[in-house]
Amino acid sequence: MPSNNSLVDLNEFSKKENCRFSLIAENAFFHSVFIDSRIVEKNSLFVALKGEKADGHDFILSALEKGASAVFVQDSFAQENLSLCKEWLKKFNASFLSFEQPLLALQRLAATYVKKFPNLKKIAVTGSSGKTTTKEMIGSILSQKYPVVMNEGNFNSETGLPLSVFKIREEHQVGIFEMGMNRRDEIAELADVLFPQIGVVVNVGTAHIGLLGSEKNIATEKRQIFKNFSAQDVAIIEEDSQWKDFLCEGLSQVHFFGEKALKITDFSNLGVKGCEFNVGGKITLPLPGYHNFKNALAAITAARLFDKITFDDIKKGLEDLKPIFGRSQIFVKEGISVINDAYNANPSSMDAALDFTRDCPVSGRKFFVLGDMLELGEKSRDFHRQIAEKLHEGTDNDCFILVGEEFNCAAKSIAEKDNRFLLVKTGEEAEKIVKDKVSAGDLVIFKGSNGIGLWKTAQNIFGDGN
């Protein structure tokens, strides 16, 4: 990219978005955008955001020293530090723009950038679980015929998605972006950044129910992915969802995904090796579990909207998939089968993981290392108790290592009468138990919310599977 070819014209943007205070350098430009000063690159825009643990304004000088050519700041900072901003403008030739809400300014900047690519076909994916895997599946299929851009991993938040869209370039024909949610109205804000033409709701479950109060409220938030839809835009929704009719309200074009809609035949569960099914031809999906099979059906439904995509493209795209670290990641280490699915968890995904593990044949024992499911609110203890009761119904050859306060409290009475239950407070304690008890022929599954850190416990014991 030419040195003076900015992703967005800062002069125009400052006028359009009613920037309250601006010091714009001569020939102002930026080629990338960051909110973390530690990874700022030369000729980048640094957006200073106030967080719970840190204030980005404290790291502006560090960002400038690394080569930032522009900075978004909060109005109060600009008012209190006008002379300092002028000094930095002169010293670093860096532009300063202030806004009442720098986060909103970042989102509006991203939306402005997206509009520079009117021919880009934009797909948004959301859901209580499985959205990252579904996004990767769609990308793997469509990349067989189209230049594709996607957000990395689960970079799907109020900051993650806006930062991701700056990866779009002229050569891209399809953009696939995941939309996550940690509060009310977040999906709506992300929809205003991307304006997707295809929206995929993988499922509506209980993730974040503690923040939103009910599944109905979660469904209401997920439906915001269709906020800016026109008559030409397409929604993709699970055929068996209890929220199907609610999600469809007001939409012109809806495609359902599921075994009936896609006329699936000859489904075969291959355990840790995945599954096989026929959808106009046989496909072997290397990701295990019925939940990943359903994710694949959502991906197939989205891919079929693209004229160039053939069955062979779908087959190759799915069969070439590699699991993402911490998500349905399965490998064998010294004769021990390991399932690292501990990047996230909610009651729906925990149930799916347990159902899958139950069906996996092994010569030894099955160890369930399960961490607390976070953000479940007042219903948290009930959800954890339900999981514990489901575990209690398992075989004599199981061992349950439950990590965290919620599981410890919910399963206490069961553990008193069932010696297969081991209640610990930390991943470090679980690590010691696994190292002591597990041997060749056993299967170990790690599942829990990211904040519990069991993905790290799995990595400490068994590595990353490579």
Image: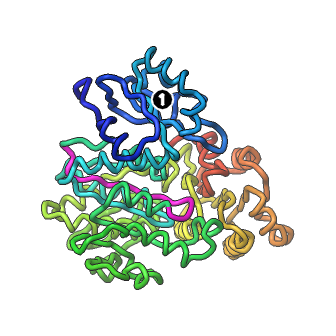
| 115 lies above or below 37 | below
| Residue 392 visible here | no
Name the magenta segment's main secondary structure.
loop
Q: Tell whether position 179 is magenta.
A: yes
Indicate left or right for 297 with 158 as reference: left
In terms of depth relative to the viewer, which is nearer, 359 or 229?
Answer: 229
Snapshot colouring: rainbow
Q: Position of residue 208 (x, y in %)?
A: 59, 65
Q: Tell whether position 127 is magenta.
A: no
In terms of depth relative to the viewer, which is nearer, 465 or 151?
Answer: 151
Give the residue at x 33% y 49%.
Answer: 150
The crowding category of the residue bearing disc 1, from other C-alpha atoms within 10 Å (few below 14, some 14 to 19, many at least 20), is: few
Q: Position of residue 235 (x, y in %)?
A: 31, 72
| 34 lies above or below 367 | above
Quarter of the image that includes the N terminus? top left
Number of numbered discs: 1
Which structural element holds mark 1?
helix
| 111 lies above or below 301 | above
Give the residue at x 69% y 67%.
Answer: 377
Q: Quadrant of residue 459?
A: top right
| Residue 245 visible here | yes
Q: Position of residue 435 (x, y in %)?
A: 70, 44
In terms of depth relative to the viewer, which is nearer, 312 or 227?
Answer: 227
Indicate left or right for 365 with 158 as reference: right
The residue labelled by disc 1 is 39
Q: Position of residue 77 (x, y in %)?
A: 58, 34
Which stretch did the figure color magenta? 171-185
In terms of depth relative to the viewer, which is nearer, 108 or 142?
Answer: 108
- In the picture as drawn, the residue positioned furthest to the left comes out as 308
Q: Name the kind of residue labelled 1 in the image.
A: Ile
Give the residue at x 50% y 25%.
Answer: 63
Give the residue at x 34% y 41%.
Answer: 13
